[in-house]
Amino acid sequence: MLDIQSLRAQFPVLRRRVNGHPLVYLDNGATTQRPARVVNKMAEYYLRHNANVHRGVHHLSALCTDANERARERVRAFINASSAEEIIFTAGTTAGINLVANSFGEAFVRPGDEILVTEMEHHSNIVPWQMLCRRAGATLKVLPVTDDGRLDLSLLPVLLTPRTRLVALTRLSNVLGTINPVRLVADAAHAVGAVVLVDAAQAVQHLPVDVAGLDCDFLAFSAHKMYGPTGVGVLYGKKSLLDKMPPWQGGGEMVRDVRFEETTYNDLPFKFEAGTPDFIGIIGVGEAIDFIDSVGMEEITARERSLTLLARDRLSTVPGLRFHGEAPESSSVISFTVEGAHPFDIGTLLDRQGIAVRTGHMCAAPLTRRFGVESMVRVSLAMYNTEEEIDLLLRALLRALLMLRG
């Protein structure tokens, strides 16, 4: 059992008040809060050890370089990759997906080829593939979602063909909370010679992520959604593929030798890490993983699923409320609309009572339209949320609806 009060005490922001009310932070799908230890670790390096990495022979540079490579190893172990060479630091999930779309696309995608995405993807896992298809003359295909928010896997054998080069899907939907059967999709994709990219932005803070067990070829996530800093992320890729892919960006660190006649590129993972990285942010990534490990992923998963079930149970009592996404395998994210009340108005009135939720299409407009709406209210939970906060949410929502309905 988690000691919730001790856990919450590590997050100073959770003690603040908003509009005269205690903050109830339920927008963790957009970004989680950071424990003091992550901020303090980064501050220590900014104030005492700051120096560029992989470039200097002096003491401070060596300290930061060692700390960055320890963080890389922490990430490798966290997602069970086989080698630290397969861990590339990026600016976030979006940057990682764009890296694959550009580099893998240049190496492997040709006119007439196909890219398959799912209907529940974030814009970051749709738009880069649209751009690739336009550049390469390929076709974008879409795996639909069922009424209860699951992938319609019955159509997978039809949509996968020998021309499919890549399948991109989310591990956990940022709108529906659905946990997708990645290994099943990966096995089907590999059977036709396609590779699989997983958007794990919503998963790494909620569920164990094992790239070997999922057998995905690429996996991307952001640190700021897993108690770490903003502007830093990770792209995992199988070494056998990364070795065949050209660099996406040119500059310092990704080169071995530069001549005007020809440039030779660095080894993995540095081939894909052009320029000065956010080396102190990367140290924060390692600290965030240490924090998650100190709590325990099994405990986190169990608690958040319990909170999700409780929140659904409480919200189901609200007259006119309709859930969007009710897949049996889901967690942490609950999206809904309420008859006669605009989601933006609900979100505004909840904020006046100190409750932070997300409203809109959650950067997944094709998915919200599939459910017949342009906007939803999203409650996204984290390990530090409490049963009392769910009760506060329910009471605040009922008050808001009373005001909106007169």
Image (cartoon, rainbow, N blue to C red):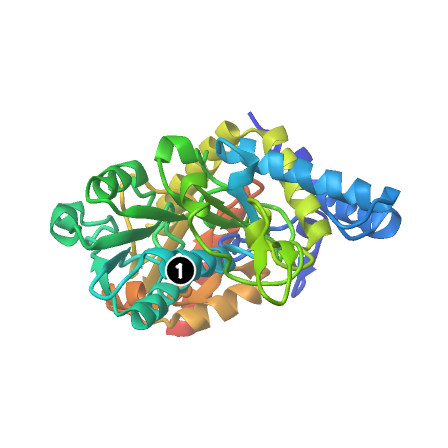
Residue appearing at x 45%, y 37% in the figure:
207
Q: Nearer the viewer, residue 13 or 298?
A: 298
Instruction: Find residue 58 and report its horizontal and vertical position in percent.
Output: 87, 45
**Tally of marks:** 1
The quarter holding residue 190 reads top left
Residue that protrudes farthest toward the front in the picture: 261
> Is 326 drawn above or below residue 97 in the view shown?
above
Q: Quadrant of the N terminus?
A: top right
Q: What's under tag 1, amino acid-wise?
A: Ala
Q: Visible in this render: residue 275?
A: yes
Compared to residue 89, the image places residue 139 above or below, namely: below
Residue 334: x and y, percent? 39, 52
Lateral position of residue 356 relative to residue 214, left or right = right
Location of residue 25 (image quadrant): bottom right
On-image quarter of the C terminus = bottom left
Q: Nearer the viewer, residue 202 or 277?
A: 277
Percent position of residue 134, x then y = 31, 72
**Residue position for label 1:** 101
Return the x and y of residue 267 as percentages of the image width and height: 57, 45
| Mark 1 surroundings: few (<14), some (14-19) or many (≥20) residues within 10 A | many
Residue found at the very far top of the displayed protein: 1
Query: In the rendered image, is residue 339 in sight?
Result: no
Label 1 sits on a secondary structure element that is helix
